[in-house]
Amino acid sequence: MPLDAAALSRALDEPLTLHRALCRREAPAFQQAARSPNDLVVACTQESRLFTELAEQTEGVPPLAERPIRFVNIRETGGWSRQAASATPKMAALLALARLSDPDPVPTVSYQSQGRVLVLGTLEAAEHAAALLADTLDVTVFATGGAGSQQRRYPVLSGRVKRLTGWLGQFSLERETSNPIDLDLCTRCNACVAACPEGAIGLDYQVDMSRCQGHRSCVPRCEVAGAIHFSRAPVVHTDTFDLVLDLRASPAFGQHAPPQGFWHVPGGADAQRLMKAVVALRGAVGEFEKPKFFTYKASICAHGRNGRVGCDACVEVCSASAIASDLKRQQIVVNPHLCVGCGACTTVCPTGALGYAYPRAPDQGVRIKTLLATYARAGGQQAALLLHSQEGGADLINDLGRAAALDPAMRGVPARVIPLALHHTASVGLELWLTALAQGASQVWVLMTEAEAPEYREAVQAQMDVAQALMTGLGYSGQHLRLLQVRDARDLAELDAALAVPAAQGVAKAATFAVQADKRTNLSLALDHLVQHAPPSAPHHTAPQVVALPAASPLGSVVVNADACTLCLSCVSACPASALQDNTERPQLRFIEKNCVQCGLCVTTCPENALQLQPRLWVSEERKQARVINEAQPYRCVRCQKPFGTLKGIEAMLGRLGGHAMFQGDALERLKMCGDCRVVDIYSAPNETRITDL
């Protein structure tokens, strides 16, 4: 690599010594650095295992649990590139990122497995898999047909699977048995198989009732009482297991991200895939922990109010089926044991009720700000932030770097493209993308592989469409947001070309604000900066301008049909963000556009169908202030003239109840009175029966 140690020293503001073979001939230099109590960053991931072992074996090195070694890759990400000579600012940024402390620990989710494994499939395939597991696990087979061994090595269940639910350590199988042969009692003597004239009994020792003609020749041949009983009533059983290996063509869990502890190998025919599952199952015994990846604030959730559904984006996008609706409690419920930590729910959540916890938004914001600030301080320009996964995405970037080092036709990762690894590519969304653009990035790209669920790609692309519409509407030229979908190393040439596109227009002055824990606050901070520093030719500099946005936008307005609206104010009580408000002194409906999250609860709640969402960004300070979007003439009591409703609302009520038998004469007239006068009038009527008289 053409490393410039002097330039890196200036960028990082500390002296650096360049090593060419630190892991081999110059290992003593590493050992000397490892003895220091200071933070230790090694710019090599290929030899991380060797460096770790060397540190553990070197006398005087602090315990790695107290002072861990941080590893960062600057070779494939920039050093092995056609633009390697210009990659110093990026390398400095990556080194600065590696020096950041780890995020604070978060609550964890625990699993306990005792090794009770259920294998579902044909008897032959299930017994083959069971033989690979039985030496370390407690195996139970659920047979779905086929011929098996004569030896009863494992408990064998049969019947119809009604439901399989749960996760590692807590799977529950609900099955219904109705077959005349009870496999628990059957000794597999084959007497019934030989006796059946229709051949309705196979070596799975179950009667095929579609072929059985009722001869019952098998019953007297069976020497075990009760093993064959044709009048046996269907019975539902519930069994519990810690692990599940499903060999059936259609798995018990159809979602993209099945529960932990569940493996699916159709037919068990793929030997490599089967062995991978067997190894994982054998290691899944004991107690395990994972971070609780999300936080949830029910008070600002826009999912439901008063039995009505508004936003259900998180439920729809979850590939693990970990999120469910709970309208009775006006919220959603997230099962932490099923959650795989993709963060897609937090990306599509318009309010921030669901937040990503590991790392938290402020921690992620520090990483982004550190990268961009260091890159700019080192002289870098037009940075493109490349967000990728820690596994598949990182492998693709490494493959591209190695290809560029060997193939003159490959460019490699450009000097201005800064990779940033995420736990999951769907965990960062609109507010952090815009924050990166406000803090000086020219572009933000997300690299996804074929391992990502289709729901993730659709959700990220929808949010990117919103972000790009915002940037274009504010006058910034070029394409700022891109979703790069690459399957694997076969598409390296496509990735190489995608990373070489021109830069887009960025802000003239980078923002310095720190990312907050609240999603809407971050979105507001980023938008304010982008609006303030938009190109001078932008239309909003001459007049208030509205930027139209796609339907997935968490920003927008509410349009009221004044002819239909009766100002019942049902929408006000339904709004979870206090965007819709009433006026205690006058019949008005007021609206603060900055607060609106476009959840649609007001639309579904309105009994008159008078409301409609309008996704947009109103480029004006007035969007932060309450404005009247509908008002009506007050209706005054016919007795005391005190206003107690709206003219349109009372007239609508009179029109609906005027033909009812209970509202005739004086009763109808009382509907025109305020509550106080209505009571007085009832008690002053001489001949009218009152409730107190009954």
Image: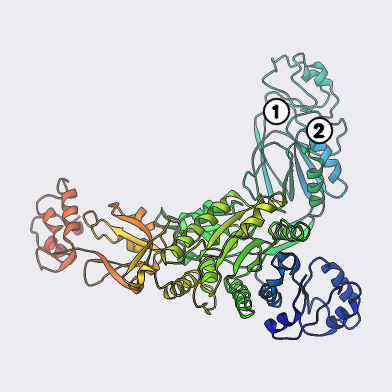
Question: Residue at the spot x=86%, y=38% of the render?
Answer: 153
Mark 2 vs mark 1: which is more N-terminal?
2
Note whether 154 is above or below 67 in the view shown. above
Query: Looking at the rendering, which quadrant does residue 118 occupy?
Result: top right
Given residues 187 and 56, the one toward you in this image is 56
Query: How far across and how far down the image is residue 122, in percent?
Result: 76, 33
Query: How far across and how far down the image is residue 641, in percent?
Result: 10, 68
Question: Residue at the spot x=72%, y=63% of the render?
Answer: 289
Q: Which residue is mark 2?
A: 124
In this view, which residue lies farthest toward the left? 686
Q: Residues within 10 Å of mark 2 (few under 14, many from 20)?
A: many
Q: Residues within 10 Å of mark 1 (few under 14, many from 20)?
A: many
Query: How far across and how far down the image is residue 372, in percent?
Result: 60, 74
Note whether 678 is above or below 307 in the view shown. below
Amino acid type shown at disc 2? Glu
Q: Is residue 453 among what the camera can see?
A: yes
Query: Looking at the rendering, which quadrant does residue 594 occupy?
Result: bottom left
Note whether 294 is above or below 151 in the view shown. below
Question: Residue at the spot x=72%, y=56% of the render?
Answer: 409
Q: Is residue 528 left or right of residue 184?
A: left
Label 2 sits on a secondary structure element that is helix
Amino acid type shown at disc 1? Asn
Q: Quadrant of the C terminus?
A: bottom left
Structural distance between the alpha carbons of marks 2 and 1: 20 Å
Tell whether label 1 touches label 2 (CB within 8 Å): no
Q: Which residue is mark 1?
A: 179
Given residues 298 and 341, the one toward you in this image is 341
